[in-house]
Image: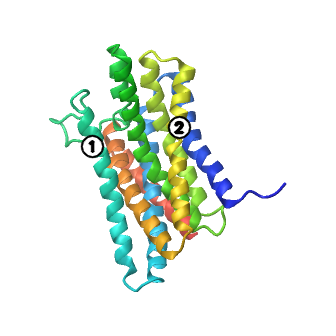
Amino acid sequence: MEALSPFAFITIVTLISGAGGTGLGGVIGALFNSESSKTVSLLLAFAGGVMSSIVCFDLLSEAAEAAKSVFDAGVWAVAAAFIVGIIVVYGLNLAIDRKTRSEVPHTKAQEHPQTHDDIDELIHADHLNEHIRNKDSRLSLVVAGIVMACAIALHNIPEGMTIGASFAISDDLMLGSGMIMAVLIGLHNIPEGMAVAVPLISGGMGKVRAVLLTTLCGLPTLLGAWLGFWLGDIGPLGLALSLGFASGAMAYVVYGEILPEAYLIYQSKAPAFAAMAGIVLGMVLIFA
């Protein structure tokens, strides 16, 4: 049997990480119809810590090196791509939040700055569930479902770009940073899948249908992986810009959403220690 091409290998791995991770979370949510806030918080914080290490110590380092091979001031191009990645993901998330905030409260403004209090708010699963509970029109349900899909895609596409760009700089597809990132994002997607499935099932949707919908929510990761790998494969400048943009988008997801959310879900020092443990593990995986 012929060996898989890099593109086919990345496609399969990303499908397992994206759709497989969210689907597994959906199955767990369907079987137990509950989620442990402590477990979700620590898993998110730990994954955020490892992602931080890989973004800062691996991806950005590779991006700067690739850019400098094209022109001396290439690091500024990487910095610009990094900032663009942050702005794009933040801006799109802000647009979705403003659209839905009037229908479903997503913050406790009196207790802390505006941010999401739980993962189902982050991906707007509670927005869809509110429409289901109120028995709103089919059009309202479709619109709410599209909003949730867009919110999840905003997280999954940059995650996928990070996977694809990581594979583009990996000498060994099986053991390189691309595979490490795919595994980490797959772990991160499990609680995300739980957060999608539990409110859907609680709102009256059948378990099989909820799990299938949850699994489909992970598919945008594949689009990001293809884009990240393609940009990283067209030359040093494309690789630098791809890694810079994906790193910025991922940095916003980690520091603007995953870590704050982990602290709010389980308000203790434990998420901070989980994140630091993740940073240490990331360093070991990169430099060992």
Q: In screen coordinates, is 212 left or right of 49?
A: right
Q: In screen coordinates, is 37 left or right of 96?
A: right
Residue in the foreground of this view, choosing between 181 and 8? 8
Residue under numbered circle 2:
22
Say if 76 sits above or below 145 in the image. below
Dot 2 amino acid type: Thr
* Disc 2/disc 1 C-alpha distance (Å): 24 Å
The residue lying furthest to the right in this view is 1
Rendered-image quadrant of the N terminus: bottom right
Image point (45%, 15%), residue name = 204
Image point (28%, 50%), residue name = 91
Residue in the foreground of this view, choosing between 129 and 192? 129
Say if 129 sits above or below 226 in the image. above
Residue under numbered circle 1:
95
Of mark 2 and mark 1, the one earlier in the sequence is: 2
Say if 131 sits above or below 28 in the image. above
Q: In screen coordinates, is 91 left or right of 287?
A: left
Dot 1 amino acid type: Ala
Q: In screen coordinates, is 113 left or right of 7?
A: left
The residue lying furthest to the front in this view is 139
Q: Position of residue 110 (x, y in %)?
A: 15, 35
Query: Is label 2 or label 1 in front?
Result: 1
Look at the image and tell me whether residue 272 can be seen: yes
Q: Position of residue 142 (x, y in %)?
A: 40, 26
